[in-house]
Amino acid sequence: MALYDNLPVFKVSYDLLRRIYRICSTMERCFRFTLGERLQNDAIEILKNIYRANNDYEKAPYIKAAREHLEVVRLLLRVAHEEKQISMKHYVEVCDLVESISKQLAAWQKSLGLSKEQGFKKKRMSCFNTKYKSLIEWEFVRAKSAQQRGSINSANHQILVKKDRVCYFFLPAAGYRNNSNGALNNRGTNGNYWSSRMNDATNAYNANFNSGNANMNNNNRANGQSIRCIAEFIINK
């Protein structure tokens, strides 16, 4: 994490604050302690929120607050210019600073949204690999499903397993393809999933479940069984 005072957006905001103090010192008295003081306070709030955003895990609320204070500064500068309290030259200079800060804050805010979306997708896709699950992984699933399993959903033929507090995935009760006659057996009542571990030259370990039981077994590798879960989603709580 960069030091807050090394951030480009902080440096430009600090420059804006200095310019505002210089401008306010030349304002007429009736504007200096009303309009001028408000300009100074909002410029300080921008810096404070940039500092907080840089140091806090949840950056978005502080960036949003900084952008709101910046818009107040933009509006007050316009009022000051129209009331002849800022020269055209100084007004153009501070407006350039405001625009630079606005673009940097917007880009920062956008980058946070993209990183969260990418992280969400990465977590979502963690279950969509082509590798067989290991025996240890299936033991975990079996233990979890034993705690939470109810009747298999008759409409979707699947079991819902809770991996942790907010992450779930579905294991369809797809049955298996019999190697001797090609028949699809136990569809809608049993789930049969290969692990990555072999038992011997003919058999491999697999996970089995139905509405009343979940266990580890080994089976002839010539049978057609599922090799991975097909859906995972996050529930926000």
Image (cartoon, rainbow, N blue to C red):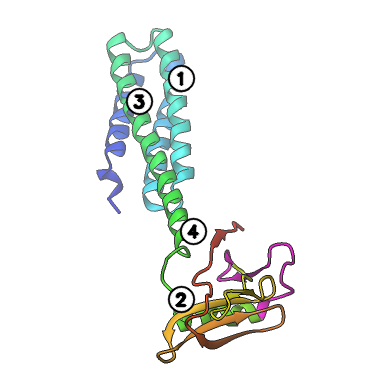
Q: Secondary structure at mark 3?
A: helix
Residue at numbered disc 2: 133
Residue at numbered disc 3: 98
Q: Which residues are magenta?
A: 147-170
Front residue (pair 8, 19):
8
Residue kind at label 1, given as amino acid type: Leu
Front residue (pair 60, 80):
60
Residue kind at label 4, given as amino acid type: Arg
Looking at the picture, how far across and down is residue 197, in whole percent?
42, 84
Front position among marks 1 and 4: 4
At 56% from the left and 59% from the top, the residue drawn is 233
Q: Is residue 169 magenta?
A: yes
Residue kind at label 3, given as amino acid type: Val
Q: Are marks 4 and 2 in contact (CB under 8 Å)?
A: no
Residue at numbered disc 1: 75
The answer to whether residue 45 is above or below residue 198 is above
